[in-house]
Amino acid sequence: MMTKAPQSKDQDEKKRLREEFRDGPMKKMCGLLSKRCKGPFYTGERMSIADLVIFGICDTVATGNFDFVETDYITKNWPNLGELTKAVKEEHLVQDYGGLKKD
């Protein structure tokens, strides 16, 4: 999804394009992911590669690294994707790998 995000050197144009993307393809994809998410992870009780991909998308938006899309856009509209992101962050393998573990 992120590679499909529209770009423009003109910031006003980029904002307009990103808002259209947010309200179109991004909304559709997040809705599909949310509908199919079994919880707490995408396929159920165990984390899979799909969760890492979804986490990457959600985290990019939540940390403000997706220009012109509100940081709470995904969690506000699809709370179960926010819960999936939280579950991935809490997974010991992710904490150990990413240096997120607080000893």
Image: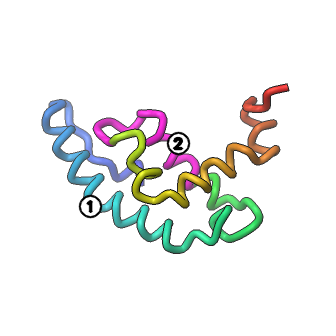
Q: CA distance from mark 1 to mark 2?
A: 20 Å
Give the side of residue 33 with respect to residue 1, left or right.
right
Indicate the amino acid at tag 1.
Gly
Q: Secondary structure at mark 2?
A: helix
Task: Tell me which numbered mark, 1 or 2, is placed earlier along the sequence.
Answer: 1
Quadrant location of the N terminus in the rendered image: bottom left
Residue sitting at the far right: 103
The spot of residue 71 in percent (x, y) is 41, 39
Which residue position is annotated with label 2?
59
Name the image quarter holding the C terminus. Answer: top right
The picture places residue 70, in percent across and down from the top left corner, at 34, 41
Q: Residue at x 76, y 48 (%)?
A: 91
Q: Nearer the viewer, residue 83 or 96?
A: 83
| Residue at numbered disc 1 | 24
Relative placement, left or right, of 6 versus 100 is: left
Stretch of the chain drawn in magenta: 54-69
Q: Is residue 61 left or right of residue 52?
A: left
Binning the other alpha carbons within 10 Å of mark 1 as few (below 14), some (14 to 19) or many (20 upward) gives: few
Task: Assess whether residue 67 is covered by the magenta stretch.
Answer: yes
Q: Amino acid at mark 2?
A: Asp
Q: In x, y percent, where is residue 10?
A: 15, 31
